[in-house]
Image (tube, rainbow, N blue to C red):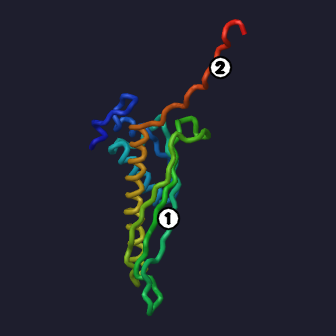
Amino acid sequence: MYAEKTVTPAGQPLVEMMRQVEIVKIEGKLGNDLRNDLIFELTGGAGNPVGAPYKMFITVVTNSASSIVDTTSGLPQNRIIHVTANWRVVRAGEETKPPVLQGKSSGSASIDVSEQRFANWRATRDAESRAARMVVEQIRAQLAAYFINPPAPPAAPAAPAAKPPGT
């Protein structure tokens, strides 16, 4: 919404800068879902840009923890699903150089544990998708902040002081 009217220091609209990031393939189903959601968020549905000036590499990790346990049966009643993404943005062709931007984003969602295996499996997948959606929103916000306020280029080293005449 605001990205269409926001102009970056480079003079381009923020929405155009966001479209200049290619999202590299992420392993796994959750990674693929996260990648597709992020591409949509950055490009507005225009698809993953080929030959973009920036590339984003993402690794996704998911884990869960039981938060409520039934004291009589010892079985969990509730589980929290955590999705964490470590990501880095590099200039295209400079994949081995330090990233221009990197970060870690995470999201969590809870599920009620059932005695039915399929219901638990489906609830876990849905929770992973909800948590991944939070991750996508965080990455988009951090990327927008970078393009709006990029770091200043490193200062050139100072020239040695000139010697006074006659010394």
- Residue in the picture at 42% in, 81% down: 68
- Residue in the picture at 32% in, 44% down: 44
Amino acid residing under circle 2 = Pro
Q: Is residue 84 above or below residue 13?
A: below
* Quarter of the rendering occupied by the N terminus: top left
Of 41 and 28, the residue lying toward us: 41
Q: Identify the mark at residue 62; answer none if there is no mark.
A: 1
- When asked about the image quadrant of residue 5, the answer is top left
Q: Element at badge 2?
A: loop
Q: Earlier in the sequence, mark 2 or mark 1?
A: 1
Amino acid residing under circle 1 = Thr
Q: Is residue 150 above or below residue 124?
A: above
- Residue in the picture at 47% in, 45% down: 23
Q: Identify the mark at residue 165; answer none if there is no mark.
A: none
Residue placed farthest to the bottom in the image? 72
Q: Is residue 158 above or below residue 74?
A: above
* Quarter of the rendering occupied by the C terminus: top right
Of 87 and 49, the residue lying toward us: 87
Q: Position of residue 101 (x, y in %)?
A: 50, 43
Dot 1: few (<14), some (14–19), or many (≥20) neighbours within 10 Å? some
- Residue in the picture at 40% in, 50% down: 38
Q: Answer left or right for 59 relative to 139.
A: right
Q: Nearer the viewer, mark 2 or mark 1?
A: 2
- Report if residue 51 is visible in the image: no
Mark 2 vs mark 1, CA separation in Å: 54 Å
Q: Element at badge 1?
A: strand
Q: Position of residue 134 (x, y in %)?
A: 38, 58
Name the residue beneath numbered marker 2: 160
